[in-house]
Image: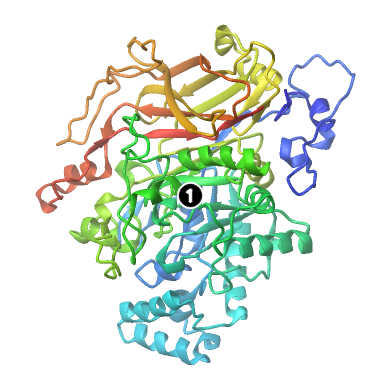
């Protein structure tokens, strides 16, 4: 077996893995050089322990007033307020309501859009460099005359045409450095981490190919950058070239995280490049290297799977945004397999068999994509997608169009209104320290998982020799790293007669709901080249039974009082420990395994709103008032 991460520092330093581009980094395994002690017994058993020992909670995708599609429609809060809020401070939202998190986050990425970064702020400040540009003067004067939405429409026309209305790198660079300074101010190693990042907003024909770009580095490397924008190119391959040049020129490190394949109309995980060429081994290597993660859940729809392509998954129909792209064209059934995480993971196995490299070998995280500067992901504390839909905004909070603002070209109704949005999500990382380096390294090696906003603790190990009692051991994690691999890892060389064994521990959010069940989702490629998926329940609450088919057919109880927006933890379990051995393992077949954890039913943000505002609001008949929040771990792959 090839170890993904070793428990002892000495072993890890002797076994550093090479990346896809032939570089080696100690950070990939979380080992510091001065931690290595070879051959010297010492009394304390923890001196040379080097594996990740805690979960850190964060959001890699928050927009502030420096994003034009936030600042031009009412968001007045900049990066400082975003970081203060994430650190646990009370902040007054742009809509007037005060807001605070139940507990601080451990880390945050302010990921403002690169396209005309800081335009709204420059308008507010009447920046002379902006006013020297005729178009800048035009939108400035519109805003100052009270027509902010007219100015926003002018910007939208330029964005849709792919034309940079300012075309001045100095303006972008100045605002970027402000964001860098803010992150440096609020970054406090060991307490709170502010990672540098931005969003590249590729939208060819209104198809979503957006990526959040996250740096490992401090200000000395990222200062004075001009973030790569959709004006530079809409092609992800050009973004990867920009990232490669950054690493070559600075010695730094960077990765990209795609999101919302559900709005890409089949382009996110397509069978061709954006230029229409077949995927090659070179393409697969570059994509797998630069994009090790996928944001599988966020406010604009959950992206794990879709009920039409996972018909045997009764939990697949969860907050789906599946009408079309942002504006121009409706959804066709053949697009769905190229839009969702589970199917992309499956198709990646087939590409690996053909090309020798898996282009879709990604871990999974969640994040918010908030445009309010506020990383609110709990249902009872949901401040929405953007300032016009913050609490207290009346009917607009529910009926504001997020997609379909412009009539589609094919006559399809692609409109999705804000009441269909989630409060989701969060990115959980297993790390040793709350620092930029430790968190980024966890993201890079995929030892991370997604949640829909809840803080469920999930830990997974897979190996060949685990026994059922191993999941009960007090040294569960140590055993897992010594004899197996964690989420994001790889299994190879199946011993004769053995099958992968998986052990999982899950613990409910201490401020949230009990757990319904823990599941293993398996995808595999058979000898005929056909792809398959199957779900196994491996731990269920309340002494329910799992049948011989590996499924529990008895639903967990539902304690939700919709009118009051309350529930109780009188059903479900607080802690689950699951052990599973693949009953249908074929050592000749490529496969992956990830864990999905479901909470008991709880109220949605719409139910909380209805209970708080009463008859002052009227919700559509199809408004979802009860749901089951969840977590998705990064997969573990088996390669023959």
587, above or below 225, in the image: above
Q: Residue at x 59, y 69 (%)?
A: 176
In this rendering, would 243 be left or right of 426?
Answer: right
Q: Residue at x 88, y 23 (%)?
A: 38
Residue 377 image offset from top left, x and y in percent? 39, 45
Q: Residue at x 36, y 62 (%)?
A: 326
Residue 501 image offset from top left, x and y in percent? 58, 16
Q: Residue at x 77, y 17 (%)?
A: 44
Residue 616 image offset from top left, x and y in percent? 12, 53
The kind of secondary structure element at disc 1 is helix
195, above or below 57, in the image: below
Q: Which residue in the rendered view is the most extreme toward the left?
A: 615
Circle count:
1
Instruction: Using the image as rendered, state which of residue 482 and residue 188 is in the foreground.
Output: 482
Q: Looking at the rendering, in which quadrant would you find the N terminus? A: top right
In this rendering, would 495 be left or right of 76?
Answer: right
* Colour mapping used in the image: rainbow
Q: Looking at the rendering, in which quadrant would you find the C terminus? A: top right
Instruction: Using the image as rendered, state which of residue 214 and residue 209 is in the foreground.
Output: 209
Instruction: Using the image as rendered, state which of residue 126 and residue 203 is in the foreground.
Output: 203
Examine the rendering and report whether any part of residue 134 can be seen: yes
Q: Which residue is mark 1?
A: 86
Examine the rendering and report whether any part of residue 434 can be seen: no
Packing grade of label 1 (10 A; few <14, some 14-19, many >=20) is many
| Residue 607 lies in quadrant | top left
Q: Which residue in the rendered view is the most extreme toward the right?
A: 39
In this rendering, would 558 be left or right of 588?
Answer: left
Residue 347 image offset from top left, x and y in percent? 52, 41
């Amino acid at each position: 077996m090839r170890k993904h991460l070793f428990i002892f520092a000495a072993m890890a330093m002797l076994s550093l893995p090479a990346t896809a581009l032939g570089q080696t980094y100690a950070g990939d395994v979380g080992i510091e050089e001065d931690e290595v002690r070879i051959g010297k017994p010492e009394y304390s058993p923890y001196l040379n322990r080097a594996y990740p020992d805690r979960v850190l909670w964060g959001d890699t995708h928050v927009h502030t007033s420096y994003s034009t599609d936030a600042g031009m429609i009412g968001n007045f809060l900049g990066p400082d307020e975003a970081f203060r809020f994430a650190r646990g401070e009370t902040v007054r939202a742009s809509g007037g309501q005060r807001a605070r998190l139940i507990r601080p986050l451990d880390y945050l990425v302010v990921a403002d859009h690169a396209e005309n970064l800081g335009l709204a702020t420059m308008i507010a400040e009447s920046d002379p460099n902006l006013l020297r540009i005729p178009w800048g003067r035009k939108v400035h004067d519109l805003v100052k005359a009270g027509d902010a939405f007219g100015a926003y429409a002018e910007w939208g026309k330029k964005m849709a045409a792919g034309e940079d209305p300012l075309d001045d790198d100095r303006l972008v660079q100045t605002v970027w450095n402000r964001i860098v300074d803010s992150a440096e101010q609020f970054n406090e190693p060991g307490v709170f981490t502010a990672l540098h990042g931005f969003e590249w907003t590729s939208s060819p024909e209104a198809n979503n190919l957006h990526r959040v770009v996250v740096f490992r580095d401090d200000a000395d490397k990222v200062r004075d950058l001009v973030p790569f924008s959709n004006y530079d190119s809409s092609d992800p391959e050009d973004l990867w070239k920009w990232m490669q040049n950054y690493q070559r020129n600075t010695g730094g490190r960077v990765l990209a995280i795609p999101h919302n394949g559900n709005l890409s109309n089949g382009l996110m995980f397509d069978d061709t490049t954006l230029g229409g060429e077949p995927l090659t081994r070179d393409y697969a290597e570059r994509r797998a290297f630069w994009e090790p993660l996928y944001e599988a859940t966020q406010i604009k729809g959950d992206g794990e799977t879709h009920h039409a392509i996972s018909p045997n998954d009764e939990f697949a129909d969860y907050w789906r945004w599946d009408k079309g792209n942002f504006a121009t064209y409706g959804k066709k059934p053949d697009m769905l397999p190229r839009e969702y995480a589970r199917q992309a993971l499956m198709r990646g196995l087939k590409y690996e068999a053909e090309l020798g490299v898996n282009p879709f070998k990604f871990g999974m995280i969640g994040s918010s994509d908030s445009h309010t500067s506020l990383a609110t992901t709990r249902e009872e504390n949901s401040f929405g997608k953007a300032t016009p839909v913050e609490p207290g905004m009346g009917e607009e909070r529910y009926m504001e169009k997020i997609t379909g603002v412009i009539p589609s070209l094919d006559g399809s109704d692609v409109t999705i209104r804000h009441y269909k949005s989630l409060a989701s999500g969060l990115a959980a990382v297993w790390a040793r320290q709350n620092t930029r380096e430790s968190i980024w390294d966890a993201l890079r090696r995929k030892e991370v998982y997604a949640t829909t906003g809840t803080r469920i603790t999930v830990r997974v190990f897979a190996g060949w020799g685990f026994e059922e009692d191993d999941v009960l051991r007090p040294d569960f994690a140590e055993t897992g790293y010594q004899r197996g691999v964690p989420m994001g890892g790889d299994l190879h060389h199946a011993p004769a007669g053995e099958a992968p064994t998986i052990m999982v521990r899950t613990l409910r959010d201490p401020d949230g709901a009990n757990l319904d069940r823990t599941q293993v989702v398996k995808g595999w490629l058979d000898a005929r080249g056909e792809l398959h998926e199957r779900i196994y329940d491996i731990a269920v609450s309340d002494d329910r039974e799992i049948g011989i088919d590996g499924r529990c057919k008895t639903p967990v109880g539902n304690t939700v009082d919709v009118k009051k927006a309350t529930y109780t933890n009188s059903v479900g379990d607080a802690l689950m420990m699951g052990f599973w051995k693949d009953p249908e393992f074929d050592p000749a077949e490529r496969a992956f395994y990830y864990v999905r954890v479901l909470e008991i039913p709880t109220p949605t943000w719409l139910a909380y709103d209805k209970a708080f505002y009463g008859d002052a609001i009227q919700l559509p008949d199809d408004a979802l008032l009860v749901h089951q929040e969840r977590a998705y771990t990064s997969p573990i792959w088996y390669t023959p």
